Amino acid sequence: MSSTLKPLRGERAGLLLLLAPTLLGLTIGVFGSVLATLALSFFDWDMLTPIKWAGTTNYTSLPNDRMFGTALINTTLFSLIYVPLTLAIGFAVACLMNRHIRGISLLRALFFLPVVSSPTAVGLLWSWIFAQDQGVLNSFITTLGGNPVNWLGPKVILYSVVIVNVWGAIGEGMIVFLAGLQAIPRELYEAARVDGATTWQRLIYVTVPAMVPSLFFQGVLSTIHAFQAFDYIYMLTRLSNGNSTFPTLVFSVYRTGFRFFRMGDAAARAVILTAIIALFTLFYIRVQKKFGAEA
């Protein structure tokens, strides 16, 4: 007797009919847009004049583009700090929230709230907190006798945008890690206690090895989010002329395409960004397979 349920021959046509809108949307909306972006990256088009063939010019000109180089460096530095912090803090919060105490559901909801909040509203709130003159943070520092800090200035802007983005991502990591923590069999912890393992030893030798799949999964998501970072950063660093004091790769795509209307150039930048994310994802998958083989 088969252990899986399969649709009868007469039901398959009905299932395909019901799935048709979703499949059509995926085909046109996802794969179609990817192919269209890739094709557009080989053309020059300003949305007003006829489209012209450009070959690989949009790609070969990127190394000489100062904005793209700065955006690539900024995004890389941001990712190197953002990803480890998101994983570490998200995991720590999940361990704290993995308890059966009164009010724990409310606490989990509060930690998850930034994930579903409007990025524009959150960005404006943090702009007020980081403001140099009347900001909440500097007001607190001056009350304690310190000197105000230009949190959005060139010296510390990297750390300021990392703080805001990590704060906004903790809830997502908490949910992923909570699911992994609650899937660990209680028998493993009981056996460790019988063997005399301390709380720290149970964390290192029981919890962390069992959480490897969740850690890799969240690592992939965090890396994708890091290279796609835009909304919080732009709200904190935007200038009156539409530029940003901390341009990222997504801002480079946005600025090139929707301010200067160089759609082919913007498409090439989007393709490069997609390739970078794909390479990191493949790297995570290979490392995870190696971990699984050694486990």
Image (tube, grey):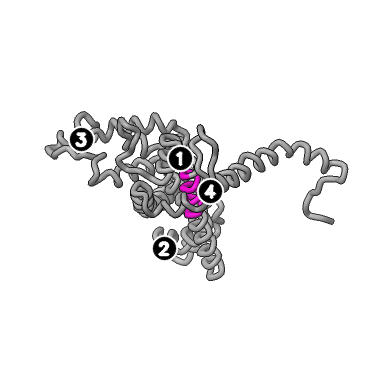
State yes or no: discs 4 and 1 in contact (Cβ < 8 Å). no
Is residue 150 or residue 167 the one in the foreground?
A: 150
In this view of the protein, can residue 5 be seen by the observer? Answer: yes
Mark-to-mark CA distance, 4 and 1:
12 Å
- Label drawn at residue 201: 2
Q: Quadrant of residue 168?
A: top left
Compare marks 3 and 1 and give the one earlier in the sequence. Answer: 3
- In the rendered structure, which amino acid carries the disc numbered 3? Asn
- How crowded pointer 3 is (Cα within 10 Å; few <14, some 14-19, many 20+) is rated as many
Q: CA distance from mark 1 to mark 2?
A: 56 Å
Q: Provide the secondary structure element on which disc 2 rests.
A: helix
Nearest to viewer (mark 4 / mark 2): 4
Residue 262 shows which numbered tag?
1
In this view, the mark in front (3 or 1): 1
Residue for badge 4: 42
Quarter of the N terminus within the rendering: bottom right
- Are circles 4 and 2 on residues that touch, CB within 8 Å? no
Q: Note whether 258 is above or below 9 in the view shown.
A: above
Q: Amino acid at mark 4?
A: Phe
Circle 2: is it few (<14), some (14-19), or many (20+) Cα within 10 Å?
few
197 or 203: nearer the eye? 203
